[in-house]
Amino acid sequence: MRNRGTVYWDWVNPELHFRNYDERLSCGTLINIQVRTSQDNLTQLFFGIYGQKGLMLLEENYPDSKGQTMTAAMAWALQRAKDWVAGQRSNPR
């Protein structure tokens, strides 16, 4: 179970079709990426990073992915999320 934050709830719109991708990393962290096309034909992106027990670690929302396709935006978000997780693991608090 993911504990969604306000970034997700501000982004979600059940009237728009979206693509969803989840990846669980070897450390147990879950990356969730959602991408959609808005009514204005903008590629919009959300990704969240969640700990092993669903605790929200980071959520980001991009209302305009600057001309990227849905596939390109999703690939960018996956790399961004993996880089963030790697940075957290190399700099524990």
Image (cartoon, helix red, strand yellow):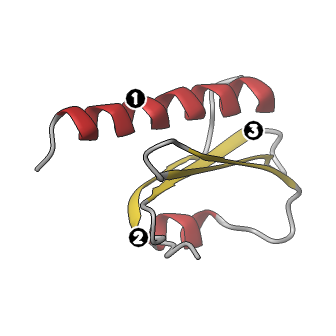
Q: Which residue is mark 3?
A: 42
- Residue 55 badge: 2
Viewer-side residue, 57 vs 63: 57
Q: CA distance from mark 2 to mark 1?
A: 19 Å
Q: Is residue 40 above or below residue 71?
A: below
**Split into 4 quadrants, where in the image is the N terminus?**
bottom right
Camera-near label (2 vs 3) is: 2
- Tell me if mark 1 has few (under 14), some (14-19) or many (20+) residues whose alpha carbon lies within 10 angstroms of its own: few
Q: In the image, 71: left or right of 87?
A: right
- Tell me if mark 2 has few (under 14), some (14-19) or many (20+) residues whose alpha carbon lies within 10 angstroms of its own: some
Identify the image quadrant of residue 76. Answer: top right
- Residue 72 badge: none
Q: x, y (%) of residue 70?
A: 78, 33
Residue drawn at point x = 45 percent, y = 63 percent = 52
Name the residue type under label 2.
Leu
Camera-near label (1 vs 3) is: 1
Label 2: which secondary element: loop
Q: Is residue 28 above or below residue 81?
A: below
* Residue 66 visible in the current orientation: yes
Q: Which residue is mark 1?
A: 83
Residue drawn at point x = 55 percent, y = 72 percent = 2
Label 3: which secondary element: loop
